[in-house]
């Protein structure tokens, strides 16, 4: 199952956080799925998690199976933040197994994560993709980094990075559309705590040393 609809929510989240932001937020953002992720307090964070029902409805109509429709309805935006001009964006998206009705395995991680990058091709010219896999504590992560230029606006160039993992209660993807290296470093160095394990940087320096399974 490829979660291509993740990207539609990712891009729509950008508009939501532009319209509704708070003052500098608390650094650690905690999810009921059992993880937390920290970003600097000068990033503008959405006051509440947008549900984006119109986007979900549109994606549901294009779904190829009932399983995919279920995934679309269950996926949640846990964190949406922007910073700088031109704006960089960080989005954390999660899929609770209690809603989806089944658990996901580490073997399903590539399909889960690659769906997001496939959807990006609707809005970006993507080049130079690189892939990796690594572990944080007992958790496996899949990661992709690529260069992206907005279609029709080749001057608007970003580094797009997506890291995904499977937790006890759900699956989660951390995504960034970074306009500069500082924003990419912020994304990668953000501390995560997964299922109560000690906090560590989301993306270690060795993340791309090991290729994920085909």
Image: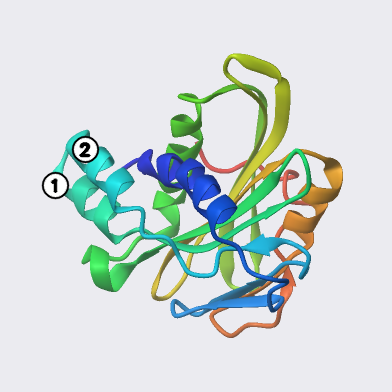
Question: Of residues 42 and 199, which is closer to you in this image?
Answer: 42
The residue indicated by pointer 1 is: 66
- Residue located 29% across and 53% down the image: 53
* Disc 2 element: loop
Classify residue 32 by image quadrant: bottom left
Viewed as shown, does residue 54 lie left or right of 29? left
Q: Is residue 204 above or below residue 26?
A: above
**Residue at the image point whose x is 36% and y is 59% from the top:** 51
Kindly indicate the quadrant of the structure image that contains residue 189. Answer: bottom right
Coordinates of residue 133 in the picture (x, y in percent): 63, 49
Between residue 91 and residue 211, name the one nearer to us.
Answer: 91
Q: Residues within 10 Å of mark 1 (few under 14, many from 20)?
A: few
User: Disc 2 and disc 1: Cα gap in Å?
Assistant: 8 Å
Identity of the residue furthest to the left in this view: 66
Residue 189 seen in render: yes
Q: Name the element at disc 1.
A: helix
Q: Residue at x 72, y 27 (%)?
A: 157
184 is higher (above) or lower (below) than 174: above
Instruction: Name the residue nearer the viewer: 122 or 167.
Output: 122
Q: Is residue 63 left or right of residue 166?
A: left
Disc 2 target residue: 63
Asked whether disc 2 touches disc 1, contact meaning CB atoms under 8 Å apart, the reply is yes
- Quadrant housing the N terminus: top left
The single residue placed furthest to the bottom in the displayed view is: 196
Q: Position of residue 37 (x, y in %)?
A: 64, 71
């Amino acid at each position: 199952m490829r979660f291509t609809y993740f990207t539609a929510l990712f891009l729509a989240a950008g508009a939501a956080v532009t319209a509704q932001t708070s003052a500098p937020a608390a650094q650690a953002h905690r999810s009921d799925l059992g993880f937390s992720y920290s970003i600097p307090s000068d990033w503008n964070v959405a006051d509440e998690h947008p549900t984006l029902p119109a986007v979900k409805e549109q994606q549901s109509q294009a779904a190829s199976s009932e399983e995919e429709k279920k995934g679309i309805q269950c996926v949640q935006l846990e964190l949406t933040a922007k910073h700088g001009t031109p704006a960089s964006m960080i989005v954390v998206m999660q899929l609770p197994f209690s809603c989806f009705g089944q658990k996901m395995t580490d073997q399903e991680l590539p399909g889960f994560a690659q769906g997001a990058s496939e959807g990006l091709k609707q809005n970006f010219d993507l080049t130079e993709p690189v892939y990796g896999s690594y572990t944080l504590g007992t958790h496996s992560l899949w990661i992709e980094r690529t260069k992206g230029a907005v279609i029709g606006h080749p001057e608007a160039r970003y580094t797009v990075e997506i890291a995904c993992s499977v937790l006890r209660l759900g699956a989660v993807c951390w995504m960034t559309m970074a306009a500069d290296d500082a924003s990419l470093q912020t994304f990668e160095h953000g501390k995560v705590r997964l299922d109560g394990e000690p906090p560590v940087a989301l993306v270690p320096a060795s993340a791309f040393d090991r290729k994920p399974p085909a």
